[in-house]
Amino acid sequence: MFFILSKLLDFVVNPLFWILALFVFGLFSRESSQKRKAYRAGIFALLFFTNSFLVNEAWLAWEPEAVFMNDVQPADAAIVLTGITQPNKSPHDRVHYNEGSERILDAIQLYKMGKVRKILISGGSGSTQKVEHTEAEDLQQTALFAGVPKSDILLEQRSRNTRENALYTKELLAKHPELEKLLLITSAFHMRRAQDCFQKVGLTFDTFPADFQTYDSNFNWGSIVPEASALYKWERLIHEWTGLVVYKVLGYA
């Protein structure tokens, strides 16, 4: 039930939903004053959420600082969170990545550098439909092709969200007591929620944020020209904010 409700909530907090709602309200409003207010609010919201400068500033404030690879302390295992592939997309002889492939690529590089001894990949499928294989299997395929031995890869394939990532990863780690020093790897925008969830279940770890979506703050007139991509970035950021609030309320983080 939580999984289905979370998908519904994603739709409700989508900025595009509210922009369209304002214009539809204005269209069907009988009072001219309400109609004008709704249209003005819709135009303002549209300009605000398509402003690339503003959304970049919001992401800069949200994403944690990057960690240099040479500064990473040696760890027994890197925990890599999924949510970055399309496991139900054909053909199934390859991995279809969305954004965020740096999660596994950075883990592989840290493994090659001798910074981590094992790679633990956590993630089943976030799809409501039956899939051919789990996301953990997808990322494992990439690691194997990169030369990481299968014996150095652990898979947790049941989780469908960040809370379950933490719960099921802890269960898996209980079977491997030799893995004491841990490094959590996920996208920078997702790190706050992931960190809180993993700490909530009692795990201790260092963090390595990856997949940064920002660029250095630099205002120019071109940055205020409306861009559809800004609307998408606001959607992702609001989704993360909402997810963290819901997790806090439910006691997951």
Image (cartoon, rainbow, N blue to C red):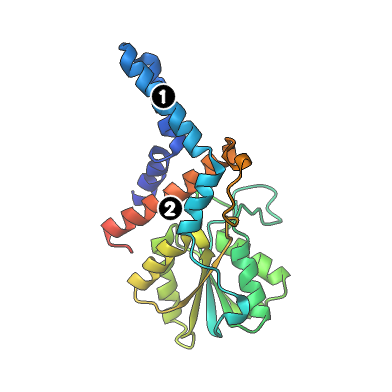
Left or right for 143, reference 20:
right
The residue tagged 1 is 40
Q: Amino acid at mark 2?
A: Glu
Report helix, strand or loop for mark 1.
helix
Image spot of residue 164 (x, y percent)? 40, 63
**Number of the front mark, 1 or 2:** 1
Image spot of residue 210 (x, y percent)? 57, 65
Callout 2 crowding tier (Cα within 10 Å): few <14, some 14–19, many ≥20: some
Residue at screen point 47% across, 51% down = 58
Residue 240 - label: 2
In the rendered image, the residue lying farthest to the bottom is: 178
Residue at screen point 34% across, 76% down = 202
Image spot of residue 13 (x, y percent)? 39, 41
Residue at screen point 57% across, 54% down = 217
Question: Does residue 234 lie above or below 47 as drawn?
Answer: below
Image spot of residue 11 (x, y percent)? 42, 39
Q: Amino acid at mark 1?
A: Arg
Residue 26: which quarter of the image? top left
Question: Does residue 244 lie above or below 167 as drawn?
Answer: above
Residue at screen point 47% across, 37% down = 48
Left or right for 8, reference 219:
left
Q: Which is more toward the observer, 37 or 109?
A: 37
**Which quadrant does the C terminus fall into?**
bottom left
Residue 190 visible: yes
Question: Does residue 64 lie above or below 231 as drawn?
Answer: below
Report helix, strand or loop for mark 2.
helix
Q: Which is more toward the observer, 217 or 172?
A: 217
In the rendered image, the residue lying farthest to the front is: 220
Callout 1 crowding tier (Cα within 10 Å): few <14, some 14–19, many ≥20: some
- Give the spatial CA distance, label 1 vs label 2: 28 Å
